[in-house]
Every structure is written in structure tokens, then in C-alpha cells.
């Protein structure tokens, strides 16, 4: 079941916006024990960490949903294909961890350290990543509805890899994500999905947005100097009180610029 669900997930992400939106979780039984229960306790995980003697712990493909793993040192841990839905990872250190194809639906990752983490194919819908550090991470997955308010996403690598045609449309999905006040300096979000994202007061300095979808997003008060807006869909986007707009790249190359909101309503 898990392999089938993962294959559907990756196929949907590669198929394009419509398919990804409709079929991302197709084939996954979200009510099954594999998705909702834990096969280990916090004590078991702590014992593994202690036994690893400073080396990265291996928790790949484990069912850890609902566990309280807050504050644990999971640096470099192998959590590939693991299920951590509704798990509490508040303040945990997951720097450099392998989170590829893992499940974090409604998980609490607030204040967690995720710098350099691998997230290809991750599903983290409605997860709480507020104040988390995702610098230099590779979140090519689904974060729809997540809370990333105040998060650090410096040099994040979320852009689609068009060099590989079979995976050329794999992208970061930040639909309806709260990125208010987030630091995205130097992030690559090329061809990403950011529809209805909240980017108020976010720092988008030197961010690559080329080809991304910002329709309906709120960028009020955001800093955009050096950000690349070539072929960015801004239909219905709120582009109000932007800082550094004159220094933004390819500002005239925005798509549906006439449909953007550029003045606050009375």
C-alpha cells in the first residue's frame, strides 16, 4: 500500500498543477494504522539515538505518527518514507536529515532545525513549521496549508529541475502556505506553486521566482529587490507597498500583471 501511495504521489507531482492538486494523496489510506499509529515509543527512539553513539539514526519507513519527539537530536537521521503525521517535533534538530517521501501531515515542526534536509517527495500538508530553519533544504514536495510564519528559508532549493525531463515538473507546492515574515533570501522557487500564499512582510531578496504561480498570493510589504519575476503569474496577487520593487528583475515580464492588486482598497 505504501509503495503504491508513493508512486501515485510522485506521478501526481510530476504531472502538473491540476493533477497534483487532485491526486497527490490518491491511493493512500490516511485512516490506516500505518498512517495514524506509531510502532515505536519515544523511549524506543531515544534508545536508538543513544545507541547510535553520535551517528545518524536510521528510522526509515517507520510509523511514528502521533509521537512526541520534541527536542530530540535527529541530525542526519534517515527518515525516508517514514510516517510522522501529527507527530510533535517542536524544536527538534533534523538538520541534514533524509526526509524524502516522508509524511508530516499536521505535524508540529515549529522551531525545528531542518537546514540542509532532503525533502524530495515529502508530504507536509497543514504542518506547523513556524519559526523553523529550512535553510539550504530541498523541499520538492507538498506543503499545502502549512504554517511557515517567521521561518528561515535562506538559499532553499525548491525550484523545479528542468534538466531531467522525466522529473522536470517536480516542484515545491506552497499553496495557501503562511510565509508571513519569513526570510527567503536567495531561495530558488522557480516554477513553484504559491497560489494564495501569505507572503506579507516576507524577505524575497534575490529569490528566483521565474515561472512560478503567485496567483492570489499576498505580498503586501514584502521585500523584492533582486527577485526574479520573469513569467510569474500574479493574477489576483496583492503587490502592495513592496520594498525594492525598482530593483526586482524582469518586473515587466510578469504574467497577468494587469490582474494584480497594486493599491490597497479603502
Image (cartoon, helix red, strand yellow):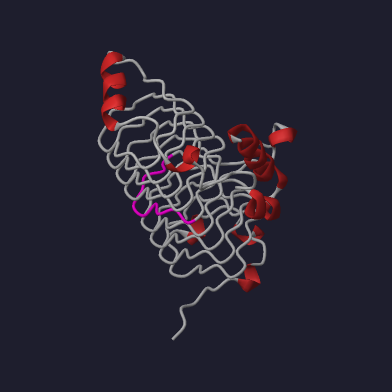
Q: For residue 254, what is the image quadrant?
A: bottom right
Foreground of the two, 144 or 64: 64
Q: Does the magenta-highlighted stretch encompass residue 41?
A: no
Relative side of 212 to 205, left or right: right
Marks counted in the figure total 0
Which residue is rendered at x = 44% and y = 86% of the image? 266
Residue 186 visible in the shown view: no
* Helix, strand or loop: magenta stretch: loop
Quadrant in which the N terminus appears: top right
- Residue 109 on image: x %, y %: 35, 44
Residue 76 visible in the shown view: yes
Which residue is rendered at x = 33% and y = 39% of the image? 67
Q: Does the magenta-highlighted stretch encompass residue 148?
A: yes
- Residue 34 on image: x %, y %: 49, 37
**In the image, farthest residue toward the bottom:** 266
In the figure, 189 relative to 55: above or below?
A: below
Relative side of 120 to 128, left or right: right
Foreground of the two, 48 or 11: 48
**In the image, farthest residue toward the right:** 165
Magenta residues (range): 145-154
**In the image, farthest residue toward the front:** 33
Foreground of the two, 254 or 123: 123
Relative side of 155 to 41, left or right: right
- Residue 219 on image: x %, y %: 47, 63
- Residue 253 on image: x %, y %: 66, 58
Amino acid at each position: 500500500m505504501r509503495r503504491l501511495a508513493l508512486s501515485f504521489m510522485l506521478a501526481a507531482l510530476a504531472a502538473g498543477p491540476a493533477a497534483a492538486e487532485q491526486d497527490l494523496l490518491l491511493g493512500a489510506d490516511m485512516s490506516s494504522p500505518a498512517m495514524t499509529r506509531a510502532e515505536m515509543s519515544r523511549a524506543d527512539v531515544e534508545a536508538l539515538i543513544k545507541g547510535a553513539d553520535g551517528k545518524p539514526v536510521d528510522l526509515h519507513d517507520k510509523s511514528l505518527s502521533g509521537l512526541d519527539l520534541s527536542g530530540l537530536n535527529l541530525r542526519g537521521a534517515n527518515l525516508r518514507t517514514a510516517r510522522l503525521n501529527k507527530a510533535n517535533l517542536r524544536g527538534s534538530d533534523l538538520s541534514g536529515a533524509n526526509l524524502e517521501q516522508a509524511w508530516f501531515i499536521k505535524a508540529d515542526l515549529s522551531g525545528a532545525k531542518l537546514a540542509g534536509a532532503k525533502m524530495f517527495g515529502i508530504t507536509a500538508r497543514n504542518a506547523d513549521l513556524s519559526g523553523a530553519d529550512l535553510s539550504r533544504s530541498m523541499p520538492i514536495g507538498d506543503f499545502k496549508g502549512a504554517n511557515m510564519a517567521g521561518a528561515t528559508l535562506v538559499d532553499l532549493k525548491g525550484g523545479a529541475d528542468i534538466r531531467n525531463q522525466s522529473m522536470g515538473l517536480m516542484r515545491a507546492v506552497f499553496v495557501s502556505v503562511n510565509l508571513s515574515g519569513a526570510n527567503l533570501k536567495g531561495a530558488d522557487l522557480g516554477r513553484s506553486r504559491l497560489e494564495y500564499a501569505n507572503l506579507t512582510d516576507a524577505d524575497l531578496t534575490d529569490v528566483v521566482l521565474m515561472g512560478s504561480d503567485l496567483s492570489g498570493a499576498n505580498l503586501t510589504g514584502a521585500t523584492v529587490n533582486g527577485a526574479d519575476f520573469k513569467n510569474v503569474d500574479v493574477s489576483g496577487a496583492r503587490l502592495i507597498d513592496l520594498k525594492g520593487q525598482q530593483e526586482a528583475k524582469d518586473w515587466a515580464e510578469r504574467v497577468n500583471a494587469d490582474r494584480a492588486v497594486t493599491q490597497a482598497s479603502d
